[in-house]
Amino acid sequence: ILQVAGGVLGAVYKPQLEAGLNLTLTEAVNLLKDNTENAKQVQESWQKFQLQSQCCGLVDGTSDWGNNINLVIDGKKICECEQKYQEENLCIPFGDRYVFKQPCKTVILDFLQKNMDIIMGIAFGMAVIEVLGLVFSMCLYCQIQRK
């Protein structure tokens, strides 16, 4: 029942996924602009994510980083786009360097939307298998009781 409910809720609230993601990421933008120790850990994590996903910022690109856009983390400036990505048209000029042009919100949203169908399919598939198991076990119980 919980799997079916989860699948139905996922299907019904799929359009509201973007609104919830926007709200969460907008709140996280303040950590990118901040200079506290906690914010620095978040910034390091986002820098790694940005390099892996070829994106910059959370919602609005480079402006999400504020004055921290020129920070150097692990030997690279924030959102710095390497030469190989420039050739793939993933970068835009920003001051004296190139940065990724796509905000990370679109990367995350695309990932969730593509995989939401798979997750719902697995939930419904497992629920069908479990219901069939219940039906067959009831049939077996009835056969045993008759003998």
Image: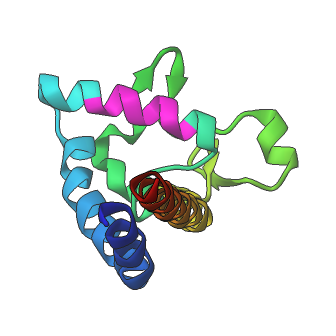
In the rendered image of this protein, does residue 14 appear above or below residue 35? below
Residue 18 in sight = no
- Give the x, y percent position of residue 78: 47, 35
- Give the x, y percent position of residue 57: 43, 51
**Furthest-right residue in this view:** 87
Residue 131 in sight = yes
The residue lying at 45 percent from left, 79 percent from top is 11
The residue lying at 85 percent from left, 50 percent from top is 88
- Give the x, y percent position of residue 102: 59, 59
- Give the x, y percent position of residue 81: 66, 39
The residue lying at 61 percent from left, 35 percent from top is 52
Q: Main secondary structure of the magenta part?
A: helix
Q: Where is residue 53, by image quadrant?
A: top right
The residue lying at 52 percent from left, 67 percent from top is 124
| Residue 39 falls inside the magenta stretch | no
Q: Which residues are magenta?
A: 42-50
Of 25 and 122, the residue lying toward us: 122
In the image, 95: left or right of 89? left
| Residue 48 falls inside the magenta stretch | yes
In the image, 52: left or right of 142? right
Of 50 and 14, the residue lying toward us: 14
Count of all numbered marks drawn on residues in the image: 0
